[in-house]
Image (spheres, grey):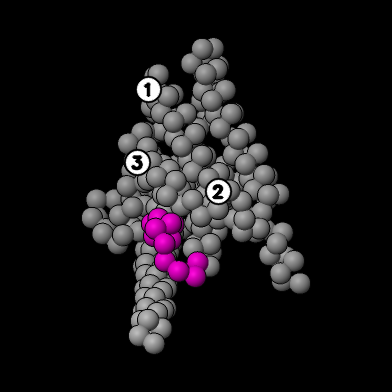
Amino acid sequence: MRTDRSKRWFSDEGKHLDRFGLVLGLSAMSVAVLSLIDLDDGASGFRSEVGTIIVTVTVGLTLVVALSASGVARRPRRIANIFIGLVIGGTILFTFLDVLVEIDGVSEVSTSKPSLVWTLIASVTPIVVLRRIMKHDRVTVQTLFGSLAVYLLLALVFNYAFLGVDNVAGGDPFFGVAETSTSFMYFSLTTLTTVGFGDLAAVSDVGRFLASAEAVLGQVLLVTVVARLVSLYSFSASVKELSDDQAGATTVE
């Protein structure tokens, strides 16, 4: 029963399975563009419009590749890909309409205001990546890439969570004062790594809860993944040593 349900969501096969090097590269690029490109409503001009497209395409492509590399079954992956494609296509279309036609309200479609479904897909992505690397029976370069990708994807998830809280807060900004969209990615990274410079802090109860949850998850993730990698590496080393001993004994005989 459980196996049948698992097969509905995961196939653990495909030509892109375990290609976590690509996932890591795209995850790092997503974090970089969200850290450098301001998508705040106050931003305007051609540079802002191009930035919106770059962020949407980069993050969307990251999610698509991560789901494929994690062995998600074709049907749920196709549904997610369709939605991601609609978000990317809609953002590009509305952005160009805003530039060319200058229709009021078109610019409301922006990655600085992530939809709930978009945020949910982003939230599921590090989970399925972590699930896949935990199934590896030996440490490979792709295992290491996958573990690093999970860490960056988690920062991406909380970036969108913080933006979501800020969007529904009405007149109460997430940080108490209005900040650029890049500040949310910066805050997510410093919280995940528990650096906490103190220049930014969540003021609402929900914001503080999310920030605390990110800090805890970041540390638990490190402990879990590192313990798993050390265990796999030790097992692989023991098996290799045993094989070498048996080969040596055979040679002596």
The reply, left or right, for residue 124 in relation to residue 219 is: right
Q: Is residue 177 above or below residue 51?
A: below
Task: Tell me which label, 2 or 1, sits earlier in the chain.
Answer: 2
Mark 1: give few (<14), some (14-19) or many (20+) Cα within 10 Å: few
Q: How busy is the neighbourhood of tag 2: few (under 14 within 10 Å), some, or many (20 plus)? A: some
In the image, what residue occupies the spot 64% across and 48% down?
A: 77
Residue nearer the viewer, 228 or 136: 136
Residue 32 is labelled as 3
Q: Is residue 140 magenta?
A: yes
Quarter where residue 242 is shown: bottom left
Secondary structure category for the residue under label 3: helix
Q: Is residue 52 visible?
A: yes
Residue that extends furthest to the front in the rendered view of this protein: 253
Residue nearest the viewer, comparing 92 with 208: 92
Quadrant where the C terminus sits is bottom left
Residue 62: image x %, image y %?
Answer: 49, 43
State the residue position of label 1. Answer: 47
- Side of 68 where 29 appears, left or right: left
How packed mark 3 is, by other alpha carbons closer than 10 Å (few <14, some 14-19, many 20 or more), is some
Is 156 magenta? The answer is no
Residue at x 49%, y 51% (from the top left corner) = 19
Provide the residue span drawn in magenta: 136-148
Q: Residue 16 has which mark?
A: 2
- Residue 132 higher or lower than 220, as above or below: above
* CB atoms of marks 3 and 2 within 8 Å: no
Overall secondary structure of the magenta section? helix
